[in-house]
Amino acid sequence: MTYAAVLFDLFDTLVRFDRDRMPEIQVSGRTVRSTAGHLHAVLSAHAPGISLEACHEALVESWREAERLRAIDYREVPAPERFGDFFRRLALDPATLPPGLGQTLIDTHRSQLGKAAELPSHHGPLLERLAHRYRLAVVSNFDYTPTAVDILEREGVAGLFSAIVVSDAVGWRKPKRAIFDEALGRLGVRAGEALFVGDRAEIDVLGAQQIGMDAAWINPDGVPLPPGIAPPRYEIRDLADLAEILEV
Ligand SMILES: [Mg+2]
């Protein structure tokens, strides 16, 4: 099979997300990994009555609510909407807060999350070889495009991709076809000319298959395919296995 383009999922496909690199905080006698400490530091200058515990709980609950909504129909809940919910849970009226505070919180959250993502050292050289032969794109389910772009830029690989498509900008998450179509349109290729590479069978593999695109499923632990999903064209243990499949 000769492809014109290769599309990649971001988290746990191109980059590893390591929760242990998230900041550590103490809440209610427990140690947790969360950006809530940094958010609380920003917030407490303007809303001194809010405790770290309340801030952490609002952050967790706003994330749960976003995940609940996303599960209904794959609509993305972008970061500003999620942080609107966060403010409501803290009974804060954004109209009474300094303009731009919401954005400052989003950027604080983004920079702490970004530190927990890392490009494995062998991925960069592989992506460079692939970029010589194929058009490359990233297609990610994430609530804030700048976080994804920052990570790829910091790791020095952003320029290898002709398109970086994140669900918050499209409005829909994988496996919805709209986000795949957006990426294919920007690459100027048809689904049948492209390979999708991702670690989530029910999102990456299924989404690609539903529009007639081949999939390579990264399955490092060799777990069984979830029921109802047809075997992907390729099943690999590591991104490095693409070298043989794509002849680079
Ligand atoms: Mg993933």
Image (tube, rainbow, N blue to C red):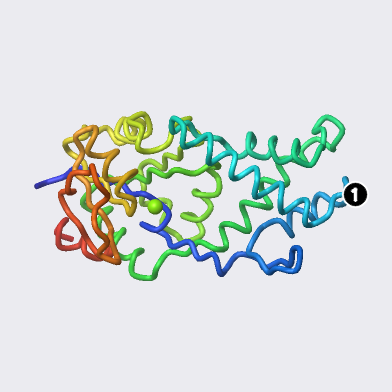
- Residue farthest to the left, as pictured: 1
Q: Is 55 above or below relative to 209?
A: below
- Residue farthest to the right, as pictured: 48
Judge left or right: residue 16 versus residue 136: right
Q: Amino acid at mark 1?
A: Gly
Judge left or right: residue 40 versus residue 15: right
Judge left or right: residue 110 versus residue 38: left
Q: Quadrant of residue 85?
A: top right
Q: How many marks?
A: 1
**Residue 1's x, y, as percent?**
9, 47
**Residue 32's x, y, as percent?**
65, 65
**Residue 204's x, y, as percent?**
31, 45
- Which of 92 and 183 lies nearest the eye of the viewer? 92
Q: Quadrant of residue 207?
A: top left
**Residue 124's x, y, as percent?**
36, 64
Residue neighbourhood size for the residue with mark 1, other residues' Cα within 10 Å, grouped as few (<14), some (14–19), many (≥20): few
Identity of the residue drawn at 63% across and 38% down? 82
Judge left or right: residue 149 versus residue 39: left
Identity of the residue drawn at 19% across and 34% down? 212
Residue bearing the label numbered 1 = 49
- Which of 81 and 202 lies nearest the eye of the viewer? 202
Identity of the residue drawn at 35% across and 43% down? 162
Q: Is 34 above or below relative to 3?
A: below
Quadrant of the image for the C terminus?
A: bottom left
Q: Is 129 above or below relative to 186?
A: below
| The CB of the residue at mark 1 lies under 8 Å from ligand 1 | no
**Local SS, label 1:** loop
